[in-house]
Image (cartoon, rainbow, N blue to C red):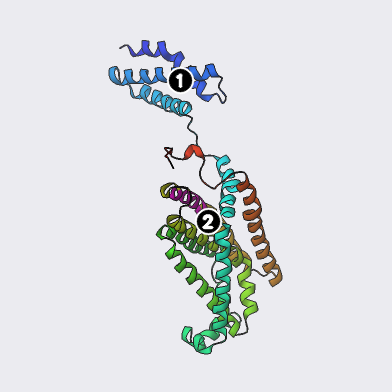
Amino acid sequence: MDLDVFVTTHQGEWARLDALIRTRRLSGEQADELVTLYQRVTGHLAKIQAAAPDPTLEGRLTTLVARGRDAVTGSRSTGWRDVGHYFAVSFPATLYRSRRWWIPVAVVSLLGAALVAWWVANHPEVRNSLVAPVELHELTRPGGSYESYYSDRPASSFAAQVWTNNAWIAAQCLLFGIALGLPVLWVLVTNVFNLGIGIGLMASAGRLDLFLGLLIPHGLLELTAVFVAGGLGLRLGWTIIDPGPRDRATALAEEGRAIIGAVIGLAVVLFASGILEAFVTPSGLPTWARIAIGIAAETLFLLYALLLGRRAAAAGEFGDVDAADRADLQPVAA
């Protein structure tokens, strides 16, 4: 085969296919032409590979055929529109639809932390079993270990460390749901005891105001993210036990995809919490101002989850990936 003659003969078809691929909206006639040219160029590539291999021309036609395949099959690439849709629709819908799980988790956890705090603050023998009196004094005194914890490292590196730690806790809650949610309970209980012990120790030293002044600016948002992760993990575990009207495989696939998406959203929420913990909590702002910032951040998140999420859920959003990205399911008899 004379390669030069072959190129000259079919150059126009290749250019036309390239032009159709670049066209955003095709008419019915143009779509038919696109399919025909794609099939022809695929044949041209096969002929060149078999009769007159030429790396440069093969590379050019391989790229053209690949682009043509994407245009014919309707493949699409993820872009900023998908990112915007996720944060404006999918993630808030997931938060709203799972509210019956994470809101009770939050209430029970906070009540549990309050109970542990009361127990520690009012029982010296419990405090002494947790920390020696000398260590307790060092921990709770003005400028002590607890207070200096937020300011003894560069803010940027501290924010990264906090974000990594909290994101890992949230990821554990989400991923452990596959084990019927039982490990999620352990993570939540551990979190409750750590919070309650901290409050109890500081309250016993008469430094509860300092504790709350340092905790609230970042802790409200941080704890809420952990509660959401725990609620989602428990919901996934319950789906294994009771998938509802869906078959178990379909239910797990849908809930699992929503949870994988939630990992991204919660990572962003915890990143914001880490920024607050590194730059607002140890700042020189008055305590009331730092607390107001924390309450404002928490309020914005709740409005995002419950108001925007309700609107997205009412529109039929489940927090799952787009239908075009899901595997096809074969209908079965009920």
Amino acid carrying label 2: it is Ala
Quadrant placement of the C terminus: top left
Q: State the SS at label 1.
A: helix
Mark 1 to mark 2 CA distance (whole Å):
43 Å
Q: Residue at 45% x, 68% y: name it.
A: 186
- 300 in relation to 131, above or below: above
Closer to the N terminus: mark 1 or mark 2? Answer: 1
- 3 in relation to 229, above or below: above
Instruction: Report x, y in % for residue 24.
Output: 56, 26
- 332 in relation to 184, above or below: above
Amino acid carrying label 1: it is Val
Q: Residue at 64% x, 58% y: name it.
A: 302
Q: State the SS at label 2.
A: helix
Which range is magenta? 251-263
Report the disc number at residue 296: none
Report the disc number at residue 35: 1
Residue, disc 2: 267
Q: Residues within 10 Å of mark 2 (few under 14, many from 20)?
A: some
- 46 in relation to 285, above or below: above
Quadrant placement of the N terminus: top left
**Which residue occupies the foreground of this view, 21 or 173?**
173
Q: Residue at 37% x, 12% y: name it.
A: 6
